[in-house]
Amino acid sequence: GEDVEQSLFLSVREGDSSVINCTYTDSSSTYLYWYKQEPGAGLQLLTYIFSNMDMKQDQRLTVLLNKKDKHLSLRIADTQTGDSAIYFCAESTSGGSYIPTFGRGTSLIVHP
Amino acid sequence: SQTIHQWPATLVQPVGSPLSLECTVEGTSNPNLYWYRQAAGRGLQLLFYSVGIGQISSEVPQNLSASRPQDRQFILSSKKLLLSDSGFYLCAWTKWGGAGNYGYTFGSGTRLTVV
């Protein structure tokens, strides 16, 4: 079945860039998402990218998609302590069962 | 604009008691609805999803059930809670249409502790 993998932890210094990586196995994935979860809260959609795109930028966030390698990354520029959270990568397929597949989440820790 | 409401936010229930968690969506029609459980290990486990009124698909056989009595209402239930039912329960919705999909929107979650 489909699988989404991401590293569990990332630690960065405030002001540096953070890069969170994700790999997926379903070659028919049409939509790829990044979610942020703060402690005790639900998941918040940060951004999404269609599979026919290579890159998407939204303020401090840059998403890169390498469809050939099935690799997705989220870059956060000028990382702040408020960016500390768990970041989930997810994918879904158009015309499928409408069920998204989530990674286990990467815990981003930002040090002052 | 669309909103999703999930309640209660926290719940402490004794073993063997019933459970009812409710989720409602506003500002859209015929959404796909989902119930997830997030254990302490962080991963999201899909419990149920629904593509229409009265249509429920179960992903994991367990002590829980779901119902969709109205288009924008999704209920998670149990007749007798087990200790292992403790966790963080999340409801989500999305829509698929001609323009594709723009993400899954989550509720704020219910922290259930079974004692």
Image (tube, rainbow, N blue to C red):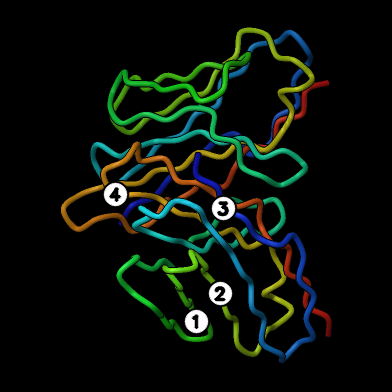
Dot 3: what SS? strand
Q: CA distance from mark 1 to mark 3?
A: 19 Å
* Quarter location, residue B74: top left
Residue A94 image label: 4
Q: Residue at x 77, y 42 (%)?
A: B40
- A2 and B42: which one is in front? A2
Q: Check disc 1: other Cα within 10 Å, few if <14, some if 14-19, many if 20+.
A: some
Question: Which residue has dot 2 on it?
Answer: A74
Q: CA distance from mark 4 to mark 1?
A: 23 Å
Q: Which amino acid type corresponds to the residue marked 4 in the rendered image?
A: Ser
Q: Residue at x 80, y 75 (%)?
A: A11
* Position of the N terminus of chain B by quadrant: bottom left
Dot 4: what SS? loop
Circles 3 and 4: CB atoms closer than 8 Å: no
Asked if marks 2 and 4 fall on the same chain, the answer is: yes
Q: Left or right: B41 with respect to B8?
A: right
Q: Left or right: A31 with respect to B35?
A: left
Circles 2 and 4: CB atoms closer than 8 Å: no
Q: Left or right: B55 with respect to B39?
A: left
